[in-house]
Image: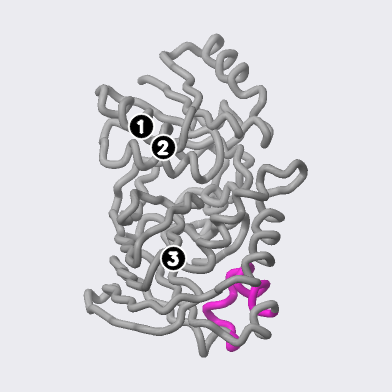
Amino acid sequence: MRELYIMNPSAGKNGASGFSEQVHAYHAANGGAYALEITKYPGHAAALAKAAAESGGEIRIWAVGGDGTLSEVCEGAAGHKNAAVGVFPYGSGNDFVRSFGGRGPFLDIVRQHGARERTVDMIRTDCGLGVGICSLGFDAKVAERMTRYKSIPGVSGSLAYILSLVCSLFGRISDELEIELVNESGETERFSGDYVFALAGNAKWYGGGFCGSPNSVLDDGLLDFVLIEKPPLWKIPQMIGIYKAGKHLADARFAPYLTYRRGTRIEMRGKGSLVSNIDGNCVRVDGAERFEILPGALRFLVPEGAAFGKENGA
């Protein structure tokens, strides 16, 4: 069994400054073939993970960083039956591990090396693969702007998201979209309107603690689709807290604007440049995007002490 640690250099700003020494000490005491790579550019983690998986033999690949780094590593390893992926969550948001009860056990290298595997689904998009939440529209615009604030000393992932959210409210908050989705019964449904965003959830949280997809299950072969049409601007401030807490699906204040479905694929078409969010990695797309479930595409490592399976509602 080989071990590869892929570390985002910015992870050190979030508590991982001594991580490499921790890895070397662990393997000096416990043995095992391993390597540690530092990413040098966007997409490098995916390339490193893919090359390692394609080299053959059983390998565990650890993402050391935030949700964006984890997403890249998952994309590189996806579909390779010899590769399992774990994460040391040293990012600003660390939303994916919230589905397993939080980051504590994931920061313990001993617990990590006693990890059990769980097969989880992934999301295929026109711009790459995701593992947590993908979205198109206002929340993706917020995530895109959020990267500017995360570099400010003392600004946490949650605070960066709030700052970006407030600033983004002064711009265009909705897009005219034509939406087609395949629901869990295999039926095609079509919607159109002025949407704040369209979300496809495999996991529950994103944006540094926003529970946008509270009913999502990581291994059920389905995505949760949350579509929100534009409400009056004066209603938005009171709706943000409800949304962050994951109570929007049942709240009467959302009912006139919200469509919720579970299914396997969603396609969105609009005009001009749109922003697509894939696990916090944001890209500009020209008028169209697609999110589709990839059942059982990833072997994920769950450390000892972390919630495993549906006992955590994951």
Q: Nearer the viewer, residue 185 or 52?
A: 52
Give the percent coordinates (x, y) of residue 155. 73, 48
Question: Is 13 located above or below residue 154 in the figure?
Answer: above
Asked if residue 242 lies in the magenta stretch, the reply is yes
Tell me the kind of residue under disc 1: Ala
Report helix, strand or loop for mark 1.
helix
Near mark 1 (Cα within 10 A), the count class, few <14, some 14-19 or many ≥20, is: some
The quadrant of the image that shows the N terminus is: top left
Report helix, strand or loop for mark 3.
strand
Give the percent coordinates (x, y) of residue 188. 24, 78
Are the residues at dot 1 and dot 2 in contact (C-beta closer than 8 Å)?
yes
Q: Which residue is mark 3?
A: 136
Q: Is residue 116 visible?
A: no
Question: Is 194 located above or below residue 43 in the figure?
Answer: below
Q: Which residue is mark 2?
A: 43
Res 47 label:
1
Q: Find the distance from the CA under tag 2 to the CA under tag 3.
A: 20 Å
Q: Find the distance from the CA under tag 1 to the CA under tag 2.
A: 6 Å
Tell me the kind of residue under disc 3: Leu
- The colour mode here is one colour
Are the residues at dot 1 and dot 3 in contact (C-beta closer than 8 Å)?
no
Asked if residue 111 lies in the magenta stretch, the reply is no
Seen at 48% across and 34% down, the residue is 63
Q: Which residues are magenta?
A: 238-253
